[in-house]
Image (cartoon, rainbow, N blue to C red):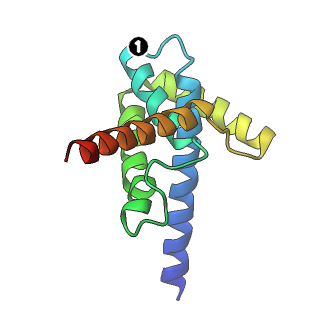
Amino acid sequence: MSKKIGMLTDIRAWARRIKRDGVMLWFACRDPRTPGWLKAMAFFVVAYALSPIDLVPDFIPVLGYLDDVILLPVLIWLIVRWLSDDVVRDCRLQAEAWMQARQAKPVSRAGLVLVLLVWSAVAWWLWRWFVSV
């Protein structure tokens, strides 16, 4: 039983670190020491991670949670790995302070717009495909 509790504690700690690093990337996007190409990648990951809606809705079996459980953590991990240690350290401190002060995760309107644009593009493509058939 204690093994299960320990594993659950580890998973919760991992989820908190991913959440913190998502917010940390938000600060890294604004840091002048972050390279431009990495800022662009981090912007899209942060916008999607902090979007109030998902690209693939959670009610879709398996795929709905795949982005939340696998895709976002892997992308966050990669970007954090590519950032310099100084930027990671400073932005993690900023993220922790921000999260403690606000007791909430930020919400990205850019992520909302990004997801809606993707959904609109897919709907337009499907409409064009069905009209041509």
Q: Image height check: is 85 above or below 1?
A: above
Question: Disc 1 residue type?
Answer: Gly
* Residue on which the image places disc 1: 36
Q: Image height check: is 20 above or below 30?
A: below
- Residue in the picture at 41% in, 13% down: 36
- Residue farthest to the left, as pictured: 133
Residue 121 located left or right of residue 19: left
- Residue in the picture at 52% in, 89% down: 1
Q: Image height check: is 105 above or below 11?
A: above
**Number of residue marks:** 1
Q: Image height check: is 130 above or below 95?
A: below
User: Can you give x and y, in whole percent of width and height, for residue 65 in the image?
Assistant: 44, 61
- Residue in the picture at 54% in, 39% down: 22
- Residue farthest to the top, as pictured: 32
Residue 120 located left or right of residue 125: right
Q: Relative to the observer, which residue lies in front, 104 or 13?
A: 104
Figure quadrant of residue 113: top right
User: Can you give x and y, in whole percent of width and height, for residue 50 in the image?
Assistant: 58, 41
Q: Relative to the observer, which residue lies in front, 69 or 65?
A: 65
User: Can you give x and y, in whole percent of width and height, for residue 70 in the image?
Assistant: 37, 55
- Residue in the picture at 50% in, 38% down: 116
